[in-house]
């Protein structure tokens, strides 16, 4: 079973909500990324997102942009990130999602990248700038590889497009509370949308919002409907 699917099933059975952590891969280097992943698992993190550094990010705020720049400066590549995931798998079963821009997968070779990601031990891909309307054979390739396909839903996403995304993603989606640089963003619009959108409780979902402390994170999790 896919590790993300298994983790959400365990959380649901326990009546708990999961904690997903994001870091930029290769910041400050890939060995630090490996060590952080192992430390996160020991700290109780449920899912780890690794941002694959890209020179021209479109959906990231300043914090993520700077992390990506440091990752590029340390020499991080798609190959290096996959090798790091494989190294993590030698010691950990923590579910891992790659947060990536389509150009990186396209240049690598989409089918080969999906295959190599699964082989390395990646559990899902969140391709930030791949519109579902233009995804082509991406979803079939993901399913064939046993990877979870994750799309983004923003507070401004219209209902008809949300329905399209629900038809195409096969596990989870992220309800964006706002731009990634914000530390104290009001996520209530995202919560309200979550209650409206996620009537299909069979599907897990996650709220994306940067928080500076445990109090705000726990408050957001308490307001988020479902799991």
Image (spheres, grey):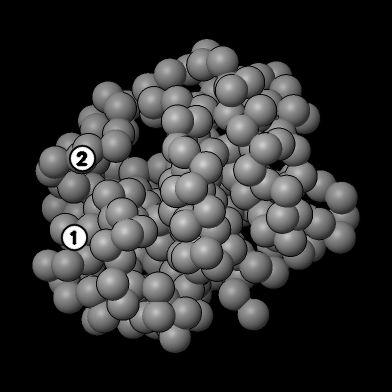
Towards the viewer: 187 or 183 = 187
Residue pointed to by mark 1: 104
Mark carried by residue 195: none
Which residue is drawn at the image coordinates 40% and 73% (left, top)?
A: 139
* Vertical placement of residue 185 versus 139, above or below: above
The quadrant of the image that shows the N terminus is bottom right
Q: Residue furthest right?
A: 14
The answer to whether residue 106 is above or below residue 145 is above
Residue 186 visible, this orientation: yes
Marks 1 and 2, Cα distance to the nearest angstrom?
Answer: 11 Å
Q: Do the residues bearing badges 1 and 2 touch, measured as CB atoms within 8 Å?
A: no
| Disc 1 residue crowd, few under 14, some 14–19, many 20+, Cα 10 Å | some
Residue at the extreme bottom of the image, as rendered: 144
Q: How many marks?
A: 2
Q: In the image, residue 148 lies at what x, y percent?
A: 50, 68
Q: Which residue is mark 2?
A: 57
Secondary structure of the residue carrying tag 1 is helix
Q: Position of residue 132 (x, y in %)?
A: 36, 59
Residue 199, given in percent of the width and then of the height, sits at 73, 48
| Quadrant in the rendering for residue 23 | top left
Near-viewer residue (148 or 6): 148
Q: Is residue 88 above or below residue 49?
A: below
Name which residue lies at 71% across and 36% down: 195
The answer, for residue 121, to whether it is visible in the render is: no
Residue drawn at x 54%, y 58% as measured from the top left: 166
């Amino acid at each position: 079973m896919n590790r993300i699917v298994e983790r959400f099933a365990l959380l649901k059975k326990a009546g708990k909500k999961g904690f997903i952590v994001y870091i930029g891969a290769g910041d400050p280097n890939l060995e630090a990324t490996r060590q952080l992943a192992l430390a996160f698992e020991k700290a109780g993190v449920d899912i780890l997102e690794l941002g694959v550094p890209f020179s021209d990010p479109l959906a990231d705020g300043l914090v993520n942009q700077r992390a990506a720049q440091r990752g590029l400066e340390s020499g991080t590549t798609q190959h290096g990130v996959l090798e790091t995931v494989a190294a993590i798998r030698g010691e950990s079963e923590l579910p891992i999602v790659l947060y990536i821009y389509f150009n990186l997968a396209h240049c690598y070779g989409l089918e080969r990248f999906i295959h190599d990601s699964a082989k390395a031990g990646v559990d899902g891909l969140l391709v930030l700038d791949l519109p579902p309307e233009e995804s082509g054979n991406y979803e079939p390739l993901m399913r064939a590889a046993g990877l979870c396909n994750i799309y983004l839903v923003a507070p401004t996403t219209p209902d008809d497009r949300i329905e399209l995304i629900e038809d195409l993603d096969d596990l989870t989606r992220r309800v964006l509370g706002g731009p990634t640089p914000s530390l104290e963003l009001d996520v209530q619009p995202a919560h309200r949308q979550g209650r409206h959108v996620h009537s299909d409780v069979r599907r897990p979902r996650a709220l994306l919002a940067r928080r500076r402390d445990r109090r705000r994170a726990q408050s957001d999790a308490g307001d988020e409907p479902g799991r």
